[in-house]
Image: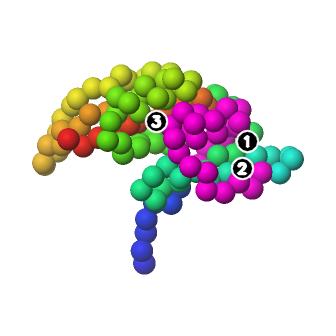
Amino acid sequence: MKFGFHHAAIKAADFQKTLDFYLNGLGFKMVRDWSTPEKSACMIDIGDGGMLEIFSGGTTEAHEEEKWLHLAFSVDDPDAAYEAAIAAGATSHIAPKDMVIQAETPLPVRLAFVRGLNGELLEFFHEK
């Protein structure tokens, strides 16, 4: 049996603003849209074969029972990704910084976090 990451999904409080944030703010690409007059839904390519599915009908409230901690994007320039997200309407959570993740083999990284338009926590991650 083979496994691989396919997509994560969010419910957007404002579907069109959320779509604009990811497509125009971060530069992701539309894969498919199956919106109807009753609900909006689409899937966008976030790079490296991964996708983000966006549905209408969400809120900006975080619920205790949610298990999704954050969505991390592998990027070559966390500072540029962070600035693009802020310019597109995200709010800062952790400004770009260098750190070393202490493990058996320490991993030096540069990373940054923002809150997306629906309160989702997004990480821009670069291994050095």
Using residue 125 as the reference point, say whether residue 48 is left or right of it: right
Q: How far is disc 1 from disc 3 in space, using C-alphas?
A: 19 Å
Residue annotated with mark 3: 122
Q: Exactly how many numbered labels are in the figure? A: 3
- Residue 92 shows in this picture: yes
Q: Which mark is residue 118?
A: none
Of residues 68 and 88, the one drawn nearer to the viewer in this rendering: 88
Tell me if residue 69 can be seen: no
Dot 3: few (<14), some (14–19), or many (≥20) neighbours within 10 Å? many
Instruction: Find out whether the residues at labels 2 and 1 contact each other: C-beta distance under 8 Å.
Output: yes
Q: Which residue is mark 2?
A: 41
Residue farthest right in this picture: 37
Residue in the image at 64% along x and 28% along y: 60
Q: From this view, report whether residue 68 is shown above or below residue 92.
A: below
Alpha carbon of mark 3 to alpha carbon of mark 2: how far? 20 Å
Nearest to N terminus: mark 1 or mark 3? 1
The residue sitting at the left extreme is: 105
Q: Residues within 10 Å of mark 2 (few under 14, many from 20)?
A: some
Image height of 92 relative to 112, above or below:
above
Residue 57, picture quadrant: top right
The amino acid beneath tag 3 is Leu
Q: Which quarter of the rendered picture does the N terminus lie within? A: bottom left
Question: Which residues make up the magenta segment?
Answer: 9-35
Q: CA distance from mark 2 to mark 1?
A: 6 Å
- At label 1, the amino acid type is Ser
Q: Which residue is mark 1?
A: 56
Q: Amino acid at mark 2?
A: Ala
Q: Which residue is found at the position 86% from the left and 46% from the top?
A: 38
Q: Secondary structure at mark 2?
A: strand
Residue lying at 49% horizontally and 29% vertically, measured from the top left: 85
Magenta stretch: residue 32 in it? yes
